[in-house]
Amino acid sequence: MMKKSILTGIKPTGQIHLGNYMGAIKPALELAKIQEFQATYFIADYHALTKMQNNAQEFRDLSNGVAATWLALGLNPEQVIFYRQSDVPEIFEMNWILSCFASKGLLNRAHAYKAIVEDNKKLEKDPDFGVNMGLFNYPILMAADILLFKTQVVPVGKDQVQHVEIARDLAQSFNRHYGETFLLPEYKIQEDTAVLPGLDGRKMSKSYQNTIPLFAEPKKLQKLINKIKTDSLPPEAPKDPETSILFRLYAEFASSQEVQEMKEQYGNGIGWGEVKKELFLVMNRFIEEPRTKYHELMSSPETIDKILKEGAEKARVMSVPFLQEIKEKIGF
């Protein structure tokens, strides 16, 4: 059976936190286990350049941190294609080719750009204040990531669907000019990855400074869990697990039997302090081994670099001849 190609990328714009793990990393790792897929993963470091500027060492550390996280959580580079975007130069040549088939009107409608324009208008600023061309052209680079590797399936959250649709638009535009060349990718919406609330109840986000780092040391992890916002119900009052961030986190890291027992305790009445104590125990148990591996990898950047360079070589086995085919069709 021919496997479907599936592609996932993560930007290194901050320390990986629980929201990243539950919303993107965990579902992507699960997809790698499905036999029908040939999985490709990449560190989207050039995408991060739209925001990450001025600190070269931090940029390198964050890129390595994303790679180390994937590897520590069980990604096997022997079984998948795993590379750093900046190690595959064909992506950036493809980016220019596709930009010549992208109308400005199409990019004007990109959600991220429109949101900035609307915010600027509310503040009575120039509509394009704070917009660099990397941010404006972001959907084209994403299309290059997708199309160059003949990706058939792109796992996305609902807010990312438009990027896959733009990639399809650009593929169709090129195909109309030069004949069938690009596959039209499909998106796979990750339905069960609802937004995870942070410590203060708002969306877990670096910008809100309300995150729980995935590999926090035990004492810090306990301290952060204790900060999670809860209501004022007394310990003996029954509680609804469906509306509890503590229960949702607990269910991610506990066994099915432990989850069932906790659910019963919610119904019977349990203090939030006790729930937080139990949450720490199951989270720390899960994170302990990956945390150790993560720190080992981060202390050996040359190991990470070697793995990613080898992955880029595997990626270029596909990207080099396909780009050559595309260029010949154009007339280069």
Image (spheres, rainbow, N blue to C red):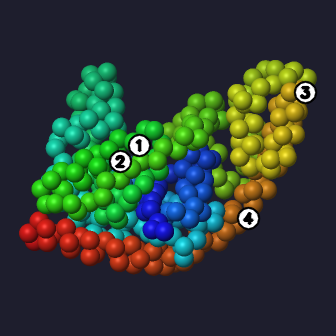
Marks 4/1: CA distance? 32 Å
Q: Which residue is depicted at the point 85% across and 46% down? A: 257
Which tag, 4 or 1, sits closer to the chain's start?
Answer: 1
Residue 51 place in picture, x, y as percent = 37, 49
User: Mark 3 packing: few (<14 Cα in 10 Å), some, or many (20+)?
Assistant: few
Q: Which residue is mark 3?
A: 268
C-alpha distance separating marks 3 and 4: 33 Å
Q: Mark 1 touching mark 2, by CB under 8 A?
A: yes
The image position of residue 287, as x and y in percent, is 72, 57
For label 3, the SS is: helix
Residue 111: where, in percent of width, then height? 33, 36
Q: In the picture, residue 191 is in which quadrant?
A: top right
Determine which residue is flagged by label 4. 289
For the question of whether residue 105 can be seen, the reply is yes
User: Of helix, strand and loop, which one carries label 4?
Assistant: helix
| Label disc, if present, on residue 160 of the rendered structure | 1
